[in-house]
Image (cartoon, helix red, strand yellow):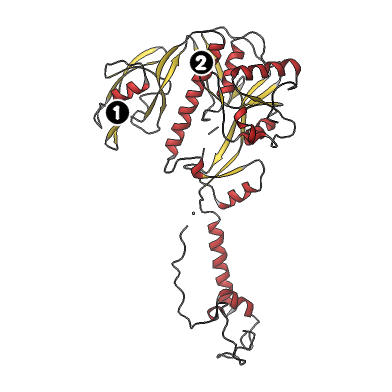
C-alpha cells in the first residue's frame, strides 16, 4: 500500500577522416594500403588486430594500447549507464500486517470508550513496496532484475505517479488516502452494529515542511475558520480562500477532546494563500477508534480494517483462529473496490503465514492463474460478503461454497 519512481544522444558529428565504405575498411585495390599494412588490415610486424581496428572504426585504433583504452572507456560508459535513473516503477511484495496484533511493537487497532472482546487468529492487511516513485528512483539494473522475477511488476512511472509530483506530495496523498480508508472502515463496522455517528470535517493530511506543519495535525476536527462554522470541507476551503497570501488563517479545531484556537500561517502558491493541508468530509464517532500502521499509506486496507473493528466490537473471535489476509478499498456503503499490486500482495500474504486471502471481485482478472501455492482466495464485492467469507472459513476451515476468482 505506499512509494518511490530516458538520455541525450551524441550530436552525430563524424571524425574528420577520408571517405570509406560503411564497414570502416579501406577500399580493396589488390595492394596493401599506404603505411605498410597487409591486405588483412594488420600492420607489418605488429600483432593481428585487424578485427579490433575495424570494429572500433578505423586506423585511429590501429595500436593495441589505444584499442584497449578505448574498450575500457566504452565499458565504463556502459557501466555508468546501468546506474542512471530510469522512468519505471518496480512493485514487489511488502509485509502483511495483522490488524488484530502489533506493528513496530505497537498495537495496530485500539478502541477506547466502548466494550471490546478478545480476538483470535489474524486479519492481515497486505502491502506493496514501490520503488521508482518521487525521491526513490530505480536503475536499469533493478528494472532488469524485476523483469526476471515473477513476484515483481515493472510499470511506466507515469501510470503510477502524476508527472512532476514530488516526494512530499506523494507522502501527503498516501496519508490522506489512509486516513479516509480508516474513517470509512469505522463507519461500515458501526453501521453493521447499528451504532450512530455524526458527519464532520477533518484535517486529513498535513504536508511536511508546510506552514501548517507543527500547528495542525491529521485528525483535527474543524469547528470554524475565521469565526465561521460550515458543514462541508468545500465550504471551509471557500472560507480559507479569503485569506491573503502570507496572512494567518484563524482556525478552531477539536483535538483529543479539547477545543483549540489556532493561527495557521500561509504561503503564496500560484497567487493564492496555502496552509499545506487537506480538508475532507469525515465522521465523528461516539468512542475512539485508532489505527496505527506507521508510514504505510494508501486506501487499500479499508476492508480488513472494517473486519477487524467489527471483530473487536463483537463477542467471540471472528476468525476461529485462522490466519486470513486480504485487501480492497471500502466506501461508506460497504462496497469493496479494486486496488493495485494484488499479485504482490498475495505473495506477501503467503510469506507471512496466511492460508486464506480476500480479493476484490474487480481484481479477479489479475488473480486468476497467479495464486501462490498454499493460498486459498475468495472474491468479495462488499463488506457483508467479506464478513460471510471470514465466518465460513472460521467454521469450516475451508473456502468450499464461497465465490472464487475462477
Q: What residue is shown at x 55% (from left), y 14% (from top)? A: 189
Residue in view at x 68 percent, y 34 percent: 368
Q: Position of residue 184 (x, y in %)?
A: 50, 19
Q: Where residue 58 sits: x, y (%)?
A: 55, 79
Label 1 near label 2: C-beta < 8 Å?
A: no
Which label is found at residue 283? Answer: none
In the image, is residue 164 above or below residue 182? below
Q: Nearer the viewer, residue 358 or 406?
A: 406
* Residue name at image x 56 percent, y 84 percent: 26
Check the picture and name the quadrant holding the N terminus. Answer: top right
Percent x, y of residue 87: 50, 48
The residue where tag 1 is placed is: 265
Q: Please name the residue shown 64% across and 85% down the image.
A: 40
Q: Is residue 136 visible?
A: no
| Labels 2 and 1: the sequence-earlier one | 2
Say left or right for 54 vs 233: right
Compared to residue 232, the image places residue 3 above or below, namely below
Binning the other alpha carbons within 10 Å of mark 1 as few (below 14), some (14 to 19) or many (20 upward) gives many
Determine the CA span between mark 2 and mark 1: 33 Å
Residue linked to disc 2: 187
Element type where label 1 sits in the image: loop
**Quarter of image, res 214:** top left
Nearer to the camera, 59 or 110: 59
Which image quadrant is residue 304 in?
top right
- Residue 74 in view, yes or no: yes
Mark 2 neighbour class, 10 Å CA radius: few under 14, some 14 to 19, many 20 or more = many
Q: How many marks?
A: 2
Q: Quadrant of the C terminus?
A: top right
Amino acid at each position: 500500500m505506499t512509494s518511490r519512481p530516458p538520455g541525450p544522444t551524441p550530436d552525430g558529428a563524424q571524425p574528420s577522416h577520408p571517405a570509406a565504405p560503411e564497414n570502416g575498411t579501406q577500399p580493396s585495390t589488390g595492394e596493401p594500403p599506404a603505411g605498410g599494412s597487409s591486405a588483412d588490415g594488420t600492420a607489418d610486424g605488429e600483432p593481428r588486430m585487424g578485427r579490433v581496428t575495424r570494429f572500433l572504426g578505423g586506423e585511429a585504433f590501429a595500436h593495441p594500447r589505444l584499442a584497449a583504452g578505448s574498450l575500457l572507456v566504452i565499458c565504463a560508459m556502459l557501466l555508468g549507464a546501468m546506474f542512471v535513473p530510469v522512468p519505471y516503477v518496480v512493485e514487489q511484495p511488502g509485509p502483511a500486517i495483522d490488524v488484530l496484533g502489533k506493528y513496530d511493537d505497537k498495537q495496530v487497532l485500539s478502541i477506547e470508550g466502548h466494550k471490546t472482546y478478545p480476538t483470535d487468529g489474524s486479519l492481515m492487511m497486505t502491502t506493496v513496496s514501490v520503488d521508482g516513485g518521487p525521491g526513490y528512483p530505480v536503475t536499469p539494473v533493478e528494472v532488469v532484475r524485476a523483469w526476471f522475477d515473477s513476484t515483481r511488476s515493472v510499470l511506466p512511472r507515469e501510470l503510477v505517479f502524476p508527472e512532476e509530483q514530488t516526494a512530499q506530495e506523494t507522502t501527503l496523498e498516501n496519508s490522506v488516502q489512509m486516513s479516509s480508508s480508516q474513517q470509512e472502515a469505522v463507519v461500515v463496522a458501526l453501521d453493521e452494529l447499528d451504532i450512530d455517528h455524526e458527519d464532520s470535517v477533518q484535517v486529513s493530511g498535513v504536508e511536511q515542511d508546510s506552514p501548517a506543519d507543527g500547528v495542525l495535525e491529521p485528525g483535527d476536527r474543524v469547528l470554524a475558520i475565521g469565526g465561521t462554522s460550515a458543514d462541508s470541507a468545500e465550504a471551509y476551503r471557500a472560507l480559507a480562500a479569503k485569506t491573503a497570501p502570507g496572512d494567518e488563517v484563524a482556525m478552531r479545531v477539536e483535538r483529543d477532546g479539547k477545543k483549540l484556537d489556532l493561527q495557521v500561517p500561509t504561503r503564496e502558491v500560484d497567487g493564492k494563500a496555502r496552509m499545506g493541508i487537506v480538508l475532507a468530509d469525515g465522521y465523528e464517532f461516539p468512542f475512539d477508534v485508532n489505527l496505527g500502521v506507521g508510514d504505510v499509506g494508501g486506501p487499500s486496507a479499508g476492508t480488513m480494517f472494517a473486519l477487524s473493528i467489527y471483530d473487536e466490537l463483537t463477542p467471540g473471535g471472528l476468525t476461529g483462529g485462522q490466519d486470513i489476509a486480504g485487501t480492497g478499498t471500502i466506501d461508506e456503503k460497504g462496497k469493496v473496490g479494486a486496488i493495485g499490486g494484488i499479485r504482490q500482495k498475495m505473495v506477501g500474504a503467503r510469506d507471512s503465514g496466511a492460508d486464506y486471502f480476500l480479493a476484490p471481485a474487480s481484481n479477479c482478472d489479475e488473480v486468476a492463474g497467479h495464486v501462490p501455492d498454499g493460498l486459498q482466495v475468495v472474491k468479495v464485492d462488499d463488506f457483508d460478503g467479506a464478513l460471510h467469507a471470514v465466518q465460513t472459513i472460521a467454521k469450516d476451515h475451508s473456502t468450499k461454497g464461497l465465490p472464487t476468482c475462477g
